[in-house]
Amino acid sequence: MATIKNALTKLNKAGFEIEQTNVTIKAIKGHEAIEIRHNLGSDQIGTIRTRRISDHDDMQSDYFAGCFVDNISQAISMADSMNRN
């Protein structure tokens, strides 16, 4: 997986608004969000997930919103294509 620094550069270049906490980065554009979790103490990305902003996880029914992707370019492409619909 890519580093957090590279992912932030690509997200900024693609026009996403970035919100960052200790372990999570949320990038929002239109109706889509890309959530990146990284390993503590590391600059490496752990997971990347895309989802609609209005769609949320429900732990009681084991529903997890969105889908996980392999890399940041795939996440940006998926978010952009969903925003066109």
Image (cartoon, helix red, strand yellow):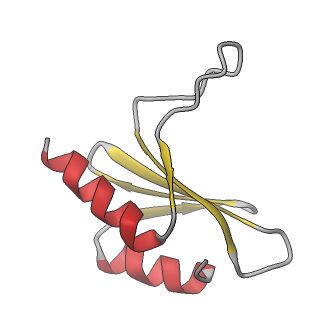
Residue 84 screen position, x and y as percent: 13, 48
Residue at 38% across / 66% down in the picture?
Answer: 74
Decide if residue 79 is on the left or right side of residue 67: left
Decide if residue 81 is on the left or right side of residue 23: left
Residue 57 screen position, x and y as percent: 59, 28
Q: Is residue 82 above or below residue 26?
A: above
Which of the image's four quarters has the C terminus? top left
Q: Is residue 38 above or below residue 78?
A: below
Residue 10 screen position, x and y as percent: 40, 80
Residue 38 position by quadrant = bottom right
Task: State the residue in front, 18 or 45.
Answer: 45
Decide if residue 8 is on the left or right side of residue 29: right
Residue at 40% across / 30% down in the picture?
Answer: 54
Extreme-right residue of the structure: 41
Decide if residue 6 is on the left or right side of residue 12: right
Task: State the residue in front, 64 or 4.
Answer: 64
Residue at 48% across / 44% down in the picture?
Answer: 67
Extreme-front residue of the structure: 70
Picture mark count? 0
Residue at 31% across / 56% down in the picture?
Answer: 78
Residue 1 position by quadrant = bottom right
Task: State the residue in front, 30 or 76.
Answer: 76
Extreme-top residue of the structure: 61
Residue 50 screen position, x and y as percent: 45, 50
